[in-house]
Image: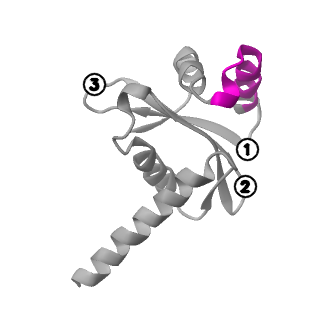
Amino acid sequence: MLISYNQNYEKIAMGLLSYIADLKNVERLQKEMESYISEEDKRLFLWRDTETDNIIAIIGIEWAESIVLVRHISVNPSFRNEGIMHKMLDKLKTRFPDQTINGTLETVPIITKWVQKNAETSSELDDEE
C-alpha cells in the first residue's frame, strides 16, 4: 500500500534511501530529505507491506502539470524481485492519473520495464476479447 511520507517515518525513509548509491553519504542524504520536505513540487511515498505492516520501500517524485518524475526508488533488499517497484508505480499512476510518469537517468530503466509490462498486459487483455 502506498502511503504519504510524514516526519514519523523519517528514519525509515532515510534508511531506505540510503540503499541508493548516490545517497550513501549522510550529508547528501540529509540534503535530499530536506528537499523532499521543503519543496512543494517534491514528495516521498512509502510502501507498506500489507502482510507484515512493515515499510519496505520508498519512491521520491517531483511533479509538474503534465509529468511525474520518479527521482528515487528503493526497496529493502529482503523484498527485492517481488515486483514491489512495479506495484508502487501502479499506485503512483492511480494517484496521478493525468500525468505521464517519467524517470531520471537512474530510474528510467525501471520506468521503461514498468511501461513495457503494462503494455504487454494490456495487449494480452486485448487478445482475450
Which residue shows up at 59% across the image and 27% down it? 17
> Disc 2 vs disc 3: which is toward the camera?
3
Position above or below: 3 against 116 = above
Please identify the quadrant where the C terminus is shown.
Answer: bottom left
**Badge number at residue 41:** 1
Position above or below: 17 against 109 = above
Please identify the quadrant where the N terminus is shown.
Answer: top left
Relative depth, front residue between 57 and 82: 82
- Mark 1 or 2 closer to N-term? 1
Dot 1 falls on a residue whose secondary structure is loop
Farthest residue toward the left? 128
Give the amino acid type for the residue marked by disc 2 in the picture.
Ala
Is residue 23 located in the magenta-colored stretch of the structure? yes
Give the amino acid type for the residue marked by disc 1 in the picture.
Asp
Which residue shows up at 71% across the image and 15% down it? 26
Residue 44 visible in this rendered orientation of the protein? yes
Q: Position of residue 34 (x, y in %)?
A: 74, 24
Provide the residue span drawn in magenta: 21-35
**Residue receiving disc 2:** 64
Labels 2 and 3 touching (C-beta < 8 A): no
Q: Position of residue 84 (x, y in %)?
A: 39, 42
Circle 1 packing at 10 Å, graded few (<14), some (14-19), many (20+), is few
Query: What is the distance, in whole Å, between disc 1 and disc 3 at their CAs?
Result: 31 Å
Labels 1 and 2 touching (C-beta < 8 A): yes
Q: Is residue 9 left or right of residue 53?
A: right
Give the amino acid type for the residue marked by disc 3 in the picture.
Thr
Q: Is residue 45 left or right of residue 124?
A: right
**Residue receiving disc 3:** 52
